Amino acid sequence: MRALIVTAVAAEADSVAAGLTPPHQDPVTPEPRTLPGGYRISRRDLPGLAADVLVGGVGPAAAAAATATALALADYSLVTSAGIGGGFAPAAPPGSLVVADALVAADLGAEGPDGFLSVDALGFGRSVHLPPAELAARAAEATGGLLAPVLTVSTVTGTAARAAELAARHPLAGAEAMEGFGVAEAAAAHGLPVLEIRAVSNAVGPRDRDAWRIGDALAALAGGFRVLGPVLVHWGGQHEQQRQHHG
Protein backbone atom coordinates (compact mmCIF):
# COMPACT_ATOMS: atom_id res chain seq x y z
CA MET A 1 0.00 0.00 0.00
CA ARG A 2 1.19 3.52 -0.79
CA ALA A 3 -0.23 6.41 1.23
CA LEU A 4 0.17 10.16 0.82
CA ILE A 5 0.20 12.05 4.14
CA VAL A 6 -0.23 15.81 3.74
CA THR A 7 0.91 18.25 6.41
CA ALA A 8 0.96 22.04 6.45
CA VAL A 9 4.43 22.80 7.83
CA ALA A 10 7.78 21.06 8.25
CA ALA A 11 7.42 20.49 12.01
CA GLU A 12 4.25 18.46 11.42
CA ALA A 13 5.87 16.47 8.61
CA ASP A 14 8.89 15.71 10.79
CA SER A 15 6.63 14.45 13.59
CA VAL A 16 4.68 12.20 11.22
CA ALA A 17 7.90 10.89 9.68
CA ALA A 18 9.39 10.24 13.14
CA GLY A 19 6.32 8.25 14.09
CA LEU A 20 6.57 6.18 10.93
CA THR A 21 10.30 5.47 11.33
CA PRO A 22 10.87 1.76 12.10
CA PRO A 23 12.64 1.24 15.44
CA HIS A 24 15.79 -0.15 13.82
CA GLN A 25 16.24 2.87 11.51
CA ASP A 26 17.90 6.18 12.18
CA PRO A 27 15.15 8.55 13.39
CA VAL A 28 16.77 11.51 11.62
CA THR A 29 14.63 12.60 8.67
CA PRO A 30 16.44 11.81 5.40
CA GLU A 31 16.94 14.53 2.81
CA PRO A 32 13.51 15.25 1.31
CA ARG A 33 12.77 15.65 -2.39
CA THR A 34 11.18 18.72 -3.92
CA LEU A 35 8.14 18.41 -6.17
CA PRO A 36 7.05 20.91 -8.85
CA GLY A 37 5.77 23.97 -7.06
CA GLY A 38 8.46 23.67 -4.40
CA TYR A 39 6.59 21.18 -2.20
CA ARG A 40 8.76 19.06 0.09
CA ILE A 41 8.11 15.34 0.23
CA SER A 42 9.90 12.54 2.10
CA ARG A 43 9.41 8.77 2.17
CA ARG A 44 8.98 6.25 4.96
CA ASP A 45 8.89 2.50 4.29
CA LEU A 46 7.28 0.05 6.69
CA PRO A 47 6.37 -3.58 6.04
CA GLY A 48 3.41 -3.36 3.70
CA LEU A 49 3.30 0.44 3.72
CA ALA A 50 5.10 3.10 1.72
CA ALA A 51 4.24 6.53 3.13
CA ASP A 52 5.07 9.79 1.37
CA VAL A 53 4.94 12.74 3.77
CA LEU A 54 4.22 16.04 2.02
CA VAL A 55 4.62 19.60 3.30
CA GLY A 56 1.82 21.34 1.45
CA GLY A 57 1.39 24.75 3.06
CA VAL A 58 -1.18 26.41 5.29
CA GLY A 59 -4.85 26.64 4.39
CA PRO A 60 -7.28 24.64 2.26
CA ALA A 61 -6.24 26.13 -1.08
CA ALA A 62 -2.53 25.48 -0.54
CA ALA A 63 -3.27 21.97 0.73
CA ALA A 64 -5.45 21.17 -2.27
CA ALA A 65 -2.82 22.43 -4.72
CA ALA A 66 0.01 20.48 -3.08
CA THR A 67 -2.07 17.31 -2.82
CA ALA A 68 -3.17 17.52 -6.45
CA THR A 69 0.45 17.96 -7.53
CA ALA A 70 1.61 14.89 -5.61
CA LEU A 71 -1.31 12.77 -6.81
CA ALA A 72 -0.50 13.62 -10.41
CA LEU A 73 3.03 12.23 -10.00
CA ALA A 74 2.41 8.87 -8.29
CA ASP A 75 -0.26 6.26 -7.61
CA TYR A 76 -1.67 6.12 -4.08
CA SER A 77 -4.31 4.09 -2.26
CA LEU A 78 -5.08 6.59 0.51
CA VAL A 79 -4.62 10.29 1.25
CA THR A 80 -4.36 11.55 4.84
CA SER A 81 -4.41 15.11 6.16
CA ALA A 82 -2.37 15.29 9.36
CA GLY A 83 -1.13 17.94 11.73
CA ILE A 84 -1.99 19.94 14.80
CA GLY A 85 -5.12 21.99 15.42
CA GLY A 86 -7.50 23.40 17.95
CA GLY A 87 -9.72 21.12 20.03
CA PHE A 88 -13.28 21.74 21.15
CA ALA A 89 -13.45 21.57 24.95
CA PRO A 90 -14.00 19.45 26.88
CA ALA A 91 -14.01 16.54 24.43
CA ALA A 92 -10.60 17.22 22.88
CA PRO A 93 -8.12 18.74 25.36
CA PRO A 94 -4.59 19.82 24.41
CA GLY A 95 -2.30 16.87 23.85
CA SER A 96 -5.10 14.59 22.64
CA LEU A 97 -5.79 13.23 19.15
CA VAL A 98 -8.88 13.60 16.98
CA VAL A 99 -9.63 11.30 14.04
CA ALA A 100 -12.18 12.73 11.64
CA ASP A 101 -15.38 10.89 10.89
CA ALA A 102 -16.22 13.86 8.64
CA LEU A 103 -14.04 16.53 7.03
CA VAL A 104 -16.13 19.69 7.05
CA ALA A 105 -15.61 23.03 5.28
CA ALA A 106 -16.98 25.07 8.17
CA ASP A 107 -16.73 28.56 6.68
CA LEU A 108 -17.22 27.87 2.95
CA GLY A 109 -20.51 29.51 1.99
CA ALA A 110 -22.31 32.80 2.54
CA GLU A 111 -23.70 34.91 5.34
CA GLY A 112 -27.44 35.56 5.19
CA PRO A 113 -30.10 37.30 7.30
CA ASP A 114 -30.72 34.04 9.11
CA GLY A 115 -27.06 33.15 9.58
CA PHE A 116 -24.47 31.11 7.73
CA LEU A 117 -25.38 29.19 4.55
CA SER A 118 -23.08 26.36 3.46
CA VAL A 119 -22.30 25.74 -0.19
CA ASP A 120 -24.59 22.70 0.03
CA ALA A 121 -27.48 24.93 1.05
CA LEU A 122 -26.59 27.38 -1.71
CA GLY A 123 -26.59 24.58 -4.28
CA PHE A 124 -22.97 25.22 -5.29
CA GLY A 125 -21.27 21.99 -4.24
CA ARG A 126 -20.38 20.09 -1.10
CA SER A 127 -18.97 21.01 2.27
CA VAL A 128 -18.40 17.54 3.76
CA HIS A 129 -16.19 14.59 2.85
CA LEU A 130 -16.53 11.28 4.67
CA PRO A 131 -13.55 8.96 5.26
CA PRO A 132 -13.97 5.18 5.10
CA ALA A 133 -15.94 4.58 8.30
CA GLU A 134 -14.15 1.37 9.30
CA LEU A 135 -10.71 2.90 8.75
CA ALA A 136 -11.53 6.03 10.77
CA ALA A 137 -12.96 3.95 13.62
CA ARG A 138 -9.93 1.65 13.72
CA ALA A 139 -7.55 4.61 13.59
CA ALA A 140 -9.33 6.24 16.53
CA GLU A 141 -9.27 3.01 18.51
CA ALA A 142 -5.58 2.36 17.83
CA THR A 143 -4.48 5.89 18.71
CA GLY A 144 -6.89 6.46 21.57
CA GLY A 145 -8.19 9.46 19.65
CA LEU A 146 -11.63 11.01 19.62
CA LEU A 147 -13.70 10.03 16.56
CA ALA A 148 -15.50 13.24 15.58
CA PRO A 149 -15.89 15.77 12.77
CA VAL A 150 -12.87 17.96 12.06
CA LEU A 151 -13.72 21.45 10.79
CA THR A 152 -11.63 23.12 8.11
CA VAL A 153 -11.48 26.91 8.50
CA SER A 154 -9.63 29.58 6.58
CA THR A 155 -9.26 31.74 9.68
CA VAL A 156 -8.40 30.11 13.00
CA THR A 157 -10.90 30.80 15.77
CA GLY A 158 -9.69 33.42 18.24
CA THR A 159 -12.80 34.50 20.17
CA ALA A 160 -15.37 32.88 22.42
CA ALA A 161 -18.16 34.13 20.17
CA ARG A 162 -16.70 32.45 17.10
CA ALA A 163 -16.11 29.22 19.03
CA ALA A 164 -19.72 29.24 20.22
CA GLU A 165 -20.98 29.86 16.69
CA LEU A 166 -19.01 26.92 15.28
CA ALA A 167 -20.05 24.66 18.16
CA ALA A 168 -23.70 25.57 17.61
CA ARG A 169 -23.51 24.73 13.90
CA HIS A 170 -21.38 21.61 14.47
CA PRO A 171 -22.18 20.33 17.97
CA LEU A 172 -20.26 17.07 17.49
CA ALA A 173 -17.06 18.71 16.21
CA GLY A 174 -13.84 17.58 17.83
CA ALA A 175 -11.28 19.90 16.28
CA GLU A 176 -10.64 22.67 13.80
CA ALA A 177 -7.70 22.98 11.41
CA MET A 178 -7.00 24.63 8.08
CA GLU A 179 -6.23 21.94 5.50
CA GLY A 180 -8.39 18.81 5.72
CA PHE A 181 -11.18 19.77 3.33
CA GLY A 182 -8.69 20.98 0.70
CA VAL A 183 -6.82 17.68 0.89
CA ALA A 184 -10.14 15.82 0.62
CA GLU A 185 -11.19 17.78 -2.46
CA ALA A 186 -7.98 16.84 -4.28
CA ALA A 187 -8.28 13.21 -3.19
CA ALA A 188 -11.89 13.03 -4.37
CA ALA A 189 -10.90 14.39 -7.78
CA HIS A 190 -8.61 11.35 -8.10
CA GLY A 191 -11.20 8.94 -6.72
CA LEU A 192 -9.20 8.27 -3.56
CA PRO A 193 -10.35 7.85 0.05
CA VAL A 194 -9.23 10.39 2.62
CA LEU A 195 -8.50 10.37 6.35
CA GLU A 196 -7.73 13.24 8.74
CA ILE A 197 -5.86 13.09 12.04
CA ARG A 198 -5.29 16.10 14.29
CA ALA A 199 -3.25 16.48 17.45
CA VAL A 200 -4.68 19.21 19.68
CA SER A 201 -2.36 22.08 20.57
CA ASN A 202 -4.91 24.48 22.05
CA ALA A 203 -8.57 24.94 22.84
CA VAL A 204 -10.83 26.44 20.19
CA GLY A 205 -11.72 29.86 21.58
CA PRO A 206 -10.01 33.05 22.72
CA ARG A 207 -6.47 33.32 21.35
CA ASP A 208 -4.09 32.64 24.24
CA ARG A 209 -0.59 31.83 23.02
CA ASP A 210 0.63 31.18 26.55
CA ALA A 211 -1.76 28.22 26.75
CA TRP A 212 -0.64 26.61 23.48
CA ARG A 213 1.02 23.20 23.84
CA ILE A 214 2.55 22.78 20.41
CA GLY A 215 5.35 20.52 21.63
CA ASP A 216 2.87 18.17 23.29
CA ALA A 217 0.72 18.15 20.16
CA LEU A 218 3.64 17.31 17.89
CA ALA A 219 4.67 14.51 20.25
CA ALA A 220 1.10 13.18 20.22
CA LEU A 221 1.10 13.33 16.41
CA ALA A 222 4.28 11.25 16.25
CA GLY A 223 2.87 8.79 18.80
CA GLY A 224 -0.31 8.44 16.80
CA PHE A 225 1.50 7.56 13.62
CA ARG A 226 3.70 5.13 15.53
CA VAL A 227 0.65 2.88 16.00
CA LEU A 228 -1.20 3.73 12.79
CA GLY A 229 1.08 1.79 10.44
CA PRO A 230 -0.51 -1.64 11.06
CA VAL A 231 -4.00 -0.12 10.81
CA LEU A 232 -3.23 1.37 7.41
CA VAL A 233 -1.62 -1.85 6.19
CA HIS A 234 -4.62 -3.93 7.28
CA TRP A 235 -7.10 -1.55 5.69
CA GLY A 236 -5.02 -1.32 2.51
CA GLY A 237 -5.03 -5.11 2.16
CA GLN A 238 -8.79 -5.28 2.58
CA HIS A 239 -9.29 -2.37 0.18
CA GLU A 240 -7.15 -4.02 -2.48
CA GLN A 241 -9.00 -7.33 -2.15
CA GLN A 242 -12.34 -5.57 -2.54
CA ARG A 243 -11.08 -3.63 -5.54
CA GLN A 244 -9.89 -6.81 -7.26
CA HIS A 245 -13.14 -8.61 -6.42
CA HIS A 246 -15.29 -5.87 -7.89
CA GLY A 247 -12.88 -5.06 -10.73
Image: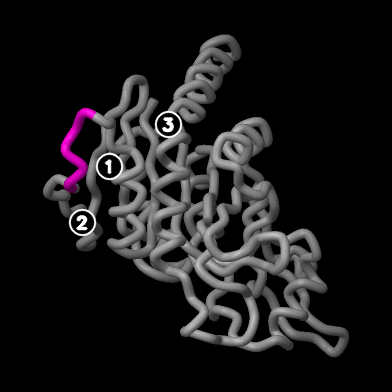
Density class for disc 3 (Cα within 10 Å; few <14, some 14-19, many ≥20) is many
Q: Give the distance between the C-alpha atoms of the residues marked 1 and 2, in whole angstroms.
A: 10 Å
Q: Residue drawn 17% across and 47% down?
A: 28
Task: Say if 103 sits above or below 4 in the image.
Answer: below
Q: Are marks 2 and 3 in contact (CB under 8 Å)?
A: no
Along the viewing direction, whichever of 93 and 114 lies nearer the viewer: 93
Say if the magenta span includes residue 212.
Answer: no
- Mark 1: which amino acid? Leu
* Residue type, numbered disc 2: Pro
Earlier-in-chain disc, 1 versus 2 = 2
Res 90 quadrant in image: bottom right
Mark number displayed over residue 229: 3
Q: CA distance from mark 2 to mark 3?
A: 28 Å
How has the structure been colored for display? Answer: one colour
The magenta segment: 24-28
Disc assigned to residue 36: 2
- Which residue sits at x=66%, y=36%? 137
Q: Main secondary structure of the magenta part?
A: loop
| Image coords of residue 13 (percent x, y) | 32, 54
